[in-house]
Image (tube, grey):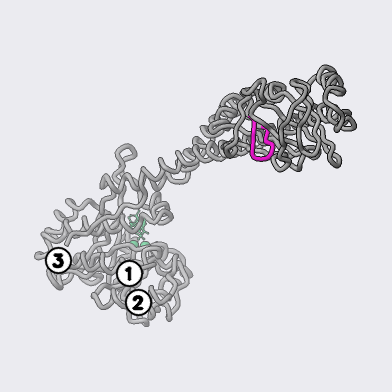
């Protein structure tokens, strides 16, 4: 089964975040402006309705005055009072006609003189106000009738609908205004209606007169909010779009800044730019090649070969170290498997692992797939864990190392002597090898104190009954010293520098 490399971050996600950071302030600002426009329109309809009520109240004051002055004349003969009725019509600007009533019979009219018509007081709102479609003379012009009564006496004065619709039109302008009296209502075009008032979609307000039995409804048809916004807010829209663009740009730059190293690593991983280099590890006794450490190199298209300490910290930080190591193991298996039959006994293959790689059990699968590429017993897979970065013994890590152990994977503590691993730590994780850090090897031939430190480390390793590998062996003197002190394995420039896979396989055939 081939090892697979999983990718982590997607370009489409980054584009989506940039677009979102640009759109969010625009949408938010738009929502606030929409809300603000609604508020402004509500205020406007309220003011308009208030003004209409004030005007109608004034007109009704005038009309009611005529009826009040005529009331004492009710009961007298129509012939005697007809002139008084007409005088009110002439004197009052809004009064169209006046009538006298006796015992709910309208018996005298300013227009027709003697008259006889039963009035139904129930038609009048609070017994005082009635909106009618028209009268006998002008059946198509609405009239508002004001009624006053005292015992059997009664007087009516009518207000011309023409004046009413004029007020609705002039005060309303773009606002839809309606005057309602009881079940009847009048629109700004002077039409009389008896059906239910229409619902206005935007900012509908209804106000009752505190003095007469009528109400005024104001509002706007659907779409007014958008129309209002497009006429009032264009400068704010430009500002919003500007903010959106700036915010989108900031989002883009921030993302680029925060993700660019890992983005570059991701690109390099997909382009297979991370390649394994191999450095031989030799037997202390006979200097035969017993294995190799796999060291990562970045074959950068512009920078050339990049050292691992320059990019491994970024890879760890972004979590890409896991797929990168997986890719390295895959390439190593592809290179070594074809020549594994020529190995003289189990060949040790050291792979460097970081603590972040040990957070879950994924590593077990990676190792299993690596081992499956070879015939059984051909190699020993050794995972190198640096002592600088100790692994916490959690339930998961302990389970991980148990499963790795069961697979036959060996564990080496890298850079031994530079960290603080305890005896308990070495036991807990079933450690097989200690790799003495090259800084101690470099002390050979130096002062007595430094050598004493190296001797103690070698002694300690021997007591722990673990395999010992000395790193950074550069001279014959170091090699002789280490061999004489029983160090089993040696690694360093003296035996071979890290080399490409092709060079390593070529050199392997000579060892
Ligand atoms: P390390 O694991 O301690 O690897 C040994 C380093 O010592 C290598 O450096 C090697 O080239 C160098 N070295 C070997 N022999 C000698 C010698 O005789 N003299 C001197 N002066 N140096 C010698 P390199 O390849 O640059 O790697 C540096 C570090 O990067 C490694 O230290 C390891 O910690 C890390 N690294 C390398 N590859 C990987 C990888 O695949 N995964 C992870 N997680 N870390 C890696
Ligand atoms: Ca190592
Ligand atoms: Ca080391």
Residue contact at pointers 2 and 1, CB within 8 angstroms: yes
Assign ligand 1 to one image quadrant. bottom left
Neighbour tally class for label 2: few under 14, some 14-19, many 20 plus, Cα within 10 Å: some
Q: Is residue 99 above or below residue 265?
A: above
Neighbour tally class for label 3: few under 14, some 14-19, many 20 plus, Cα within 10 Å: some
Secondary element under disc 2, as helix, strand or loop, is helix
In what quadrant of the picture does the N terminus appear?
bottom left
Q: Identify which residue, 200 or 277, lies in the foreground.
A: 200
Q: Is residue 413 magenta?
A: no
In the rendered image, residue 227, in percent from the top left (x then y), is placed at 56, 27
Residue found at the very far top of the displayed protein: 90
Residue linked to disc 1? 361
Q: Identify which residue, 46 or 240, lies in the foreground.
A: 46
In the rendered image, residue 338, in percent from the top left (x then y), is placed at 11, 59
Q: CA separation, marks 2 and 3?
A: 25 Å
Residue found at the very far left of the displayed protein: 341
Q: Which residues are magenta?
A: 179-186
On screen, residue 21 versus residue 405, left or right, reads right
Q: Residue at horizontal 82%, vertical 25%?
A: 78
In the rendered image, residue 361, in percent from the top left (x then y), is placed at 32, 69
Residue linked to disc 2? 399
Q: Quadrant of residue 148?
A: top right
């Amino acid at each position: 089964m081939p090892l697979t490399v999983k990718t982590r971050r997607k370009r489409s996600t980054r584009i989506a975040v940039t677009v979102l950071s640009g759109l969010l302030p625009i949408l938010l600002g738009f929502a606030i402006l929409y809300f603000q426009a609604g508020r402004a329109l509500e205020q406007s309809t309220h003011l308009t309705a208030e003004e209409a009520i004030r005007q109608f109240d004034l007109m009704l004051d005038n009309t009611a005055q005529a009826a009040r002055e005529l009331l004492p004349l009710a009961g007298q003969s129509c012939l005697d009072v007809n002139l008084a009725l007409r005088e009110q019509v002439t004197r009052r600007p809004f009064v169209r006609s006046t009538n006298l009533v006796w015992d709910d019979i309208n018996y005298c009219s300013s227009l027709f003189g003697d008259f006889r018509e039963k009035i139904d007081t129930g038609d009048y709102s609070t017994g005082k106000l009635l909106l009618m479609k028209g009268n006998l003379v002008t059946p198509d012009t609405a009239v508002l009738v004001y009624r006053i009564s005292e015992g059997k006496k009664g007087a009516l004065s009518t207000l011309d609908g023409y004046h009413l619709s004029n007020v609705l039109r002039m005060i309303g302008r773009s606002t839809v205004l309606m005057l309602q009296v009881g079940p009847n209502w009048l629109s700004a075009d002077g039409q009389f209606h008896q059906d239910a008032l229409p619902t206005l979609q935007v900012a509908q307000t209804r106000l009752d007169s505190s003095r007469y039995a009528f109400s005024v409804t104001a509002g706007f048809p659907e779409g007014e909010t958008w129309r209002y916004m497009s006429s009032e807010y264009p400068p704010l829209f430009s500002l919003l779009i500007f903010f959106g663009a700036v915010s989108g740009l900031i989002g883009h730059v921030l993302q680029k800044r925060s993700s660019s190293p890992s983005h570059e690593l991701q690109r390099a991983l997909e382009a297979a730019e991370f390649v394994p280099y191999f450095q031989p590890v030799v037997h202390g006794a006979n200097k035969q090649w017993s294995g190799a450490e796999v060291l990562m190199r970045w074959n950068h298209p512009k920078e050339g070969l990049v050292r691992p300490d320059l990019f491994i910290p970024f890879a760890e930080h972004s979590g890409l170290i896991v797929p990168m190591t997986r890719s390295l193991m895959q390439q190593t298996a592809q290179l070594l498997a074809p020549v594994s039959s020529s190995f003289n006994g189990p060949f040790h293959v050291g792979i460097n692992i970081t603590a972040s790689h040990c957070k879950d059990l994924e590593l077990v699968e990676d190792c299993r797939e690596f081992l499956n590429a070879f015939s059984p017993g051909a190699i020993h897979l050794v995972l190198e864990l640096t002592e600088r970065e100790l692994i916490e013994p959690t339930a998961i890590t302990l389970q991980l190392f148990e499963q790795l152990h069961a697979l036959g994977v060996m564990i080496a503590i890298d850079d031994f002597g530079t960290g603080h691993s305890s005896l308990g730590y070495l036991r807990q994780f079933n450690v097989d090898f200690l790799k003495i850090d090259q800084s101690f090897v470099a002390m050979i031939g130096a002062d007595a104190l430094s050598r004493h430190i190296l001797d103690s480390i070698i002694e300690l390793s021997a007591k722990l009954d673990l395999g010992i590998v000395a790193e950074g062996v550069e001279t014959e003197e170091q090699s002789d010293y280490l061999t004489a002190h029983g160090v089993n394995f040696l690694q360093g420039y003296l035996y071979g520098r890290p080399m490409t896979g092709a060079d390593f396989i070529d050199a392997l055939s000579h060892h």
